[in-house]
Amino acid sequence: MKIDIPSANLVACMCEGGAETEIMNILLDNHLLIFEREQLLEERLLPRTSVKEFERRYLRLEYDQKILVLRVIDSRGEEFNLSKAYRCQVEVVNIITAPEIEMLIIVSQKKYADFCNSRIKKPSDYCKIELKMKKVKSPEFIRDYFADPNFLISSIKEYNRVHKQKSGENSLFDLLKKK
């Protein structure tokens, strides 16, 4: 799906966990996304938080521009319903990494079909059991594994190719700059 982020918009990018945060940091630090770190609220990625906490912490301040909330999450059914008072100044877009961000590792190892045919349901378990990668959920592992940003980009593109998103969903692929 096409996501448009005007350079005048503020972006509140919330990441589900450490692995997602690290992937987003790699992409931001290498200017590979359709927005820059300077557009981020507080110029940093935010941890996932409740709607009420987000409103209390960030939306009670006055901003000159619209805020786009990007939620990098793996669960499709999770709602983020803002109070009526904030709906006109904030747009919420979910970036779905389902079933888990570790799918990028599986795809990068050319094991997607093997994973799909295995009895192992969780990608993180597959990485631990079949690929012998014990700390796949740690930010340090992700930072080391995807130290080459081009390797990360090719993994995101390959996952987009082999795993079709549901209609109307956004993925990390949709946040990449198009060359």
Image (tube, rainbow, N blue to C red):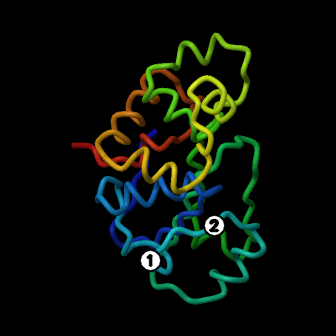
Amino acid type of the residue tagged 1 in the rendering:
Glu
For the residue labelled by badge 2, is the local secondary structure a helix, a strand or a loop?
A: strand
Mark seen at residue 151? none
Q: Quadrant of residue 16?
A: bottom right
> Is 110 in front, or is 7?
110
Name the residue located 75 percent from the left edge and 76 percent from the top edge. 53
Q: Is 95 on the left or on the right of 152, as rendered?
A: right
**Mark 2 in CB contact with mark 1 (< 8 angstroms):** no
Residue beneath disc 1: 43
Q: Quadrant of residue 169?
A: top right
Q: Quadrant of the C terminus?
A: top left
> Is 173 in front, or is 112?
112
Circle 1 packing at 10 Å, graded few (<14), some (14-19), many (20+), is some
Percent position of residue 84, x then y: 74, 71
Up the image or down, 120 lies above or below 76; here it is above
> Is 113 in front, or is 66?
113
Mark seen at residue 47? 2
Q: Is 177 on the left or on the right of 91, as rendered?
A: left
Amino acid type of the residue tagged 2 in the rendering:
Pro
> Is 139 in front, or is 77?
139
Alpha carbon separation for disc pair 2 and 1? 13 Å
- Number of numbered discs: 2
Name the residue located 64 percent from the left edge and 49 percent from the top edge. 73
Name the residue located 60 percent from the left edge and 56 percent from the top edge. 71
Circle 2 packing at 10 Å, graded few (<14), some (14-19), many (20+), is some
For the residue labelled by badge 1, is the local secondary structure a helix, a strand or a loop?
A: helix
Percent position of residue 38, x then y: 36, 75
Name the residue located 52 percent from the left edge and 41 percent from the top edge. 170
Percent position of residue 23, x then y: 47, 52
Q: Is 98 on the left or on the right of 70, as rendered?
A: right
Percent position of residue 107, x then y: 47, 27
Up the image or down, 173 lies above or below 22; here it is above
